[in-house]
Image (spheres, rainbow, N blue to C red):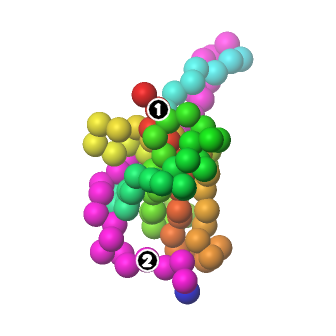
């Protein structure tokens, strides 16, 4: 499969955060964030034409993030990836080859 990557390339430790709502007992919800997983990733800053292409869509510094596909973790456009002191907001999610092996994310560092 062309989308498979070498697992040894996943050298950065990241935490996957997702939004969640906790009932407030009065019929409403209190927004919050949960740490859904800590996993290994490959994080690459986007440069050149790809960065310009993504930068035209969103404001911030774009990154390409590759992760192993997991059935126990939801990754979508509300997910945040914490990498060291950086918090990256997921902009797009691709299940490489739709094979449920790896995710390829475009994530944005705002700041």
- Residue drawn at x 54%, y 55% is 49
Q: Quadrant of residue 84?
A: top left
Quadrant where the C terminus is found in the figure:
top left
Residue 36 horizontal/vertical position (percent) = 45, 47
Residue 18 horizontal/vertical position (percent) = 52, 40
Count residues near mark 2 (Cα–Cα under 10 Å), then give few for <14, some for 14-19, many for 20+. Answer: some
Q: Name the residue under label 1.
A: 110
- Residue drawn at x 52%, y 50% is 51
Residue 34 visible at all: no
Count residues near mark 1 (Cα–Cα under 10 Å), then give few for <14, some for 14-19, many for 20+. Answer: few
Residue 21 horizontal/vertical position (percent) = 60, 29
| Residue 20 drawn above or below residue 49 | above
- Residue drawn at x 28%, y 63% is 11
Q: Name the residue under label 2.
A: 5
Residue that sits furthest to the top in the current view: 26
Residue that sits furthest to the bottom in the current view: 1
Magenta span covers which residues? Answer: 2-26
Residue 44 visible at all: yes
| Residue 14 drawn above or below residue 110 | below
Q: Does the magenta stretch include residue 16?
A: yes
């Amino acid at each position: 499969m062309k989308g498979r990557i070498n697992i040894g390339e996943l050298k950065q430790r990241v935490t996957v955060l997702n939004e969640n709502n906790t009932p407030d007992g009065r019929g409403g919800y209190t927004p919050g964030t949960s740490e859904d997983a800590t996993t290994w990733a490959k994080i690459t800053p986007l440069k050149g034409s790809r960065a310009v292409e993504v930068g035209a869509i969103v404001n911030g510094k774009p990154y390409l993030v590759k992760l192993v596909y997991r059935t126990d973790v939801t990754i979508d456009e509300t997910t945040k990836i914490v990498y060291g002191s950086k918090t990256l907001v997921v902009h797009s999610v691709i299940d490489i080859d739709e094979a449920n092996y790896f995710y390829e994310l475009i994530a944005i560092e705002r700041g």
